[in-house]
Image: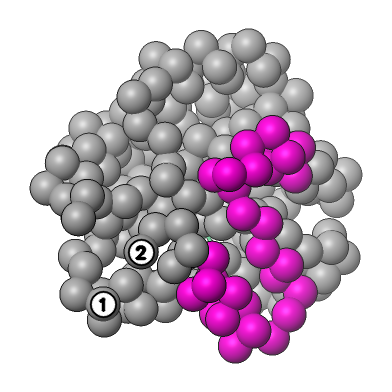
């Protein structure tokens, strides 16, 4: 079977990260080879860029270019080789996050996003994207309970996160066969059942 590329997306506090490992294990139990990775990051250089992106103030376009620089490296060293070997890649965030955060949240001109997307991965798109959606106040409450130092994005105001959420939903609306919206305001077990059904229907 050919390898598949699955991405997870959603606003900060949507709880997607806890489902990434679980889905990978579920796929491995079916005998598939699965790589779990994340963006920004996923390679030694990408993880260094992540450190900067999450902590150092920078111009919006610098932020966008670094996101795509990390992505180029990630595609070349991890994602494309794995898919070429027929293996699966489960990635915590990908280009839809740039569309939502730098585009929706920060107001980057969409045509600049499209140029970079075309340049960096015209030939690769996720087979399926799971968009974890929930009301902003629930997500904010989850972030507020975190006992760690919040990164630059998590520290943004509520209106920033509302624009990110709306941009994600708009992107899902424009790409209904690839992006599946998961209602994240449900108990863990219910969400897992939805994930099983959604991934099986398209990918297995
Ligand atoms: P996140 O998945 O939230 O990491 P963690 O679960 O460990 O907190 O990702 C880090 C942040 O990076 C997140 O707030 C969104 C941001 N981000 C962008 O702004 N643009 C992008 O293209 C990507 C991939 C992430």
Please state the horizontal and vertical placement of residue 125, each as a whole percent of the image.
Answer: 42, 35
Residue at position x 76%, y 74% in the image: 185
Queried whether the magenta region covers residue 186, the answer comes back as yes
Whether 77 is among the magenta residues is: no
| Label located before the other in sequence (1 or 2) | 1
State the CA–CA distance, disc 1 to disc 2. Answer: 10 Å
| Residue 32: image location, x then y, percent | 21, 68
Look at the image and tell me whether residue 92 can be seen: no
Task: Please identify the quarter of the rendering in which residue 176 is found.
Answer: top right
Indicate the position of residue 7 as horizontal and vertical percent values. 46, 52
> What residue did someone put label 2 on?
204
Q: Is residue 7 above or below residue 140?
A: above
- Name the residue: 22% across, 45% down: 83
Location of residue 122 with respect to 44 vertically, above or below: above
Residue at x-position 20% and y-position 55%? 1
Residue placed farthest to the left in the image? Answer: 85
Q: Kindly state the secondary structure of the residue where label 1 is placed.
A: loop
Q: Is residue 73 left or right of residue 125?
A: left
Residue placed at 22% from the left, 38% from the top?
A: 80
Q: Nearer the viewer, residue 178 or 72?
A: 178
Query: SS at mark 2?
Result: loop
Quadrant assignment, res 98: top right
Asked where in the image residue 66 lies, by quadrant, the reply is top left
Within 10 angstroms of label 2, few (less than 14), some, or many (20 or more) residues? few
Which residue in the protein does label 1 denote? 30
Q: Is residue 1 visible?
A: yes
Comparing 130 with 12, the one in front is 130
Relative horizontal placement of residue 5, taking residue 44 as reference (left or right): right
Q: In the image, which residues are magenta?
A: 169-198
Q: Are the residues at dot 1 and dot 2 in contact (C-beta closer than 8 Å)?
A: yes
């Amino acid at each position: 079977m050919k390898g598949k590329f699955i991405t997870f997306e959603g606003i900060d506090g949507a709880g997607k990260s806890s489902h990434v490992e679980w889905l990978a294990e579920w796929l491995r139990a079916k005998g598939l080879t699965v790589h779990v990775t994340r963006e920004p990051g996923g390679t030694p250089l990408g993880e260094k860029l992540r450190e900067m992106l999450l902590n150092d103030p920078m111009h919006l376009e610098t932020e966008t270019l670094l996101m795509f620089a990390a992505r180029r490296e990630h595609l070349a060293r991890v994602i494309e080789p794995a898919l070429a070997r027929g293996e699966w890649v489960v990635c915590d965030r990908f280009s839809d996050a740039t569309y939502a955060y730098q585009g929706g949240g920060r107001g980057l001109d969409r045509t600049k996003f499209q140029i970079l997307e075309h340049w960096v991965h015209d030939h690769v798109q996720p087979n399926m994207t799971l968009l974890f959606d929930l009301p902003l106040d629930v997500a904010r409450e989850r972030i507020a309970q975190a006992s760690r130092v919040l990164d630059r994005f998590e520290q943004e105001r509520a209106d920033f996160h509302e624009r990110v959420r709306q941009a994600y939903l708009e992107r899902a609306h424009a790409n209904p066969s690839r992006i599946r919206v998961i209602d994240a305001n449900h108990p863990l077990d219910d969400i897992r059942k939805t994930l099983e059904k959604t991934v099986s229907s398209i990918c297995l």
